[in-house]
Image: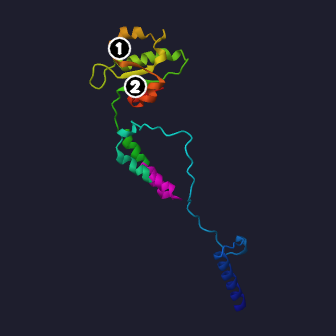
C-alpha cells in the first residue's frame, strides 16, 4: 500500500512541478487536475470610431445635473474591469432605473422647434404647415404666442405650404416661423431645443 501511495504522491509532485515550469498535461489524465481560473481581460484594443466626434458640446445634456452622470460612469468603469457577477448587474439595473426616473422629471422650456419633413413627400407639406401654425399660434409659457418653429427652406416657395397665406393668417408667423438650412444646422445646432421628424 505504501508503494502505491508514495507513487501517486510522486506523480502529483511531478505534475505540480511541471505545471510551474509551464508544461501542461491532458485534463483527462488525472482526477485532481482542474482548469486554470479565468483571468481578467487586459490590454483590450480600443478601436477608433469611424466618424470623428463632433466638436460642439451637447446642449441638451449640459442642462442635466452632473451628479447624475457619476453613477453611470462608475457603472461603465465597473463593466470594463472584468467579469461581473449577478449582484453587480442587479445593482446596475437599479441604478439605471433611478437615473431614468430623475431624467423623466426634468422639464425643459422649449423655445425653438425644428421640423424635418421628408423631401418629395407631398402629403407631408400640409401637415407640416398645420403643425407649424399650431405651434406658433398656441400660447405657451405665459406668452400670447407659441414657440419659434424652423421648417426646411425648400418649403418656403411651395404653393402647398402657402407661406404668404400663413403671414396673413397670423401676425406671429413673421417673427416665429423661420427656415433652416444644412449650413444653419452645422453652424448653430444649439438653437434647436426639440426636433420633430
Q: Residue 106, percent across and down?
A: 35, 38
Q: Position of residue 118 (x, y in %)?
A: 53, 21
Q: Name the residue under label 1.
A: 174
**Mark 2 lies on residue:** 113
Q: Is residue 88 magenta?
A: yes
Examine the image and state in which quarter residue 50 appears.
top right
Residue lying at the far left of the rendered structure: 142
Q: Can residue 1 be seen in this view?
A: no
Left or right placement of residue 16 versus residue 135 in this view: right
Residue drawn at point x = 50 percent, y = 54 percent: 79
Q: Residues within 10 Å of mark 2 (few under 14, many from 20)?
A: many
Local SS, label 1 = helix
Residue 132 in the image, given as x and y percentages of width and height: 41, 18
Q: Is residue 14 left or right of residue 175?
A: right
Q: Nearer the viewer, residue 71 or 102?
A: 71
Q: For the residue labelled by badge 2, is the local secondary structure a helix, a strand or a loop? A: strand
- Residue 134: image x %, image y %? 38, 18
Q: Does 122 sit above or below residue 22? A: above
Per the picture, the main secondary structure of the magenta-coloured stretch is: helix
**Residue 82 sits above or below residue 191 on the image:** below
Q: In the picture, residue 129 is in which quadrant?
A: top left
Task: For marks 2 and 1, give the one nearer the viewer.
Answer: 1
Of residues 64 and 178, the one drawn nearer to the viewer in this rendering:
178
Which region of the structure is painted magenta? 75-95
Residue 52 covered by magenta stretch? no
Tell me the distance, in whole angstroms, between the alpha carbons under discs 2 and 1: 16 Å
Picture residue at 55% right of the left edge, 17% below the top: 121
Which class describes the residues within 10 Å of circle 1: few (<14), some (14-19), or many (20+)?
few
Q: In which quarter of the image is the N terminus?
A: bottom right
Amino acid at each position: 500500500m505504501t508503494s502505491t501511495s508514495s507513487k501517486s504522491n510522486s506523480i502529483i509532485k511531478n505534475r505540480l512541478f511541471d505545471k510551474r515550469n509551464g508544461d501542461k498535461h491532458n485534463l483527462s489524465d488525472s482526477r485532481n487536475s482542474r482548469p486554470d481560473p479565468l483571468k481578467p481581460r487586459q490590454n483590450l484594443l480600443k478601436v477608433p470610431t469611424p466618424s470623428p466626434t463632433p466638436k460642439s458640446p451637447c446642449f441638451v445634456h449640459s442642462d442635466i445635473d452632473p451628479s447624475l452622470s457619476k453613477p453611470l460612469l462608475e457603472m461603465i468603469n465597473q463593466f470594463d474591469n472584468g467579469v461581473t457577477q449577478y449582484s453587480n448587474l442587479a445593482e446596475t439595473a437599479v441604478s439605471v432605473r433611478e437615473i431614468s426616473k430623475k431624467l423623466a422629471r426634468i422639464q425643459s422650456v422649449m423655445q425653438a422647434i425644428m421640423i424635418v419633413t421628408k423631401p418629395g413627400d407631398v402629403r407631408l407639406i400640409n401637415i407640416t404647415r398645420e403643425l407649424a401654425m399650431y405651434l406658433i399660434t398656441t400660447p405657451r409659457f405665459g406668452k400670447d404666442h407659441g414657440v419659434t418653429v424652423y421648417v426646411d427652406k425648400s418649403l418656403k416657395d411651395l404653393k402647398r405650404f402657402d407661406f404668404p397665406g400663413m403671414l396673413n393668417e397670423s401676425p406671429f408667423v413673421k417673427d416665429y416661423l423661420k427656415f433652416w438650412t444644412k449650413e444653419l444646422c452645422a453652424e448653430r445646432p444649439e438653437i434647436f431645443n426639440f426636433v420633430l421628424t
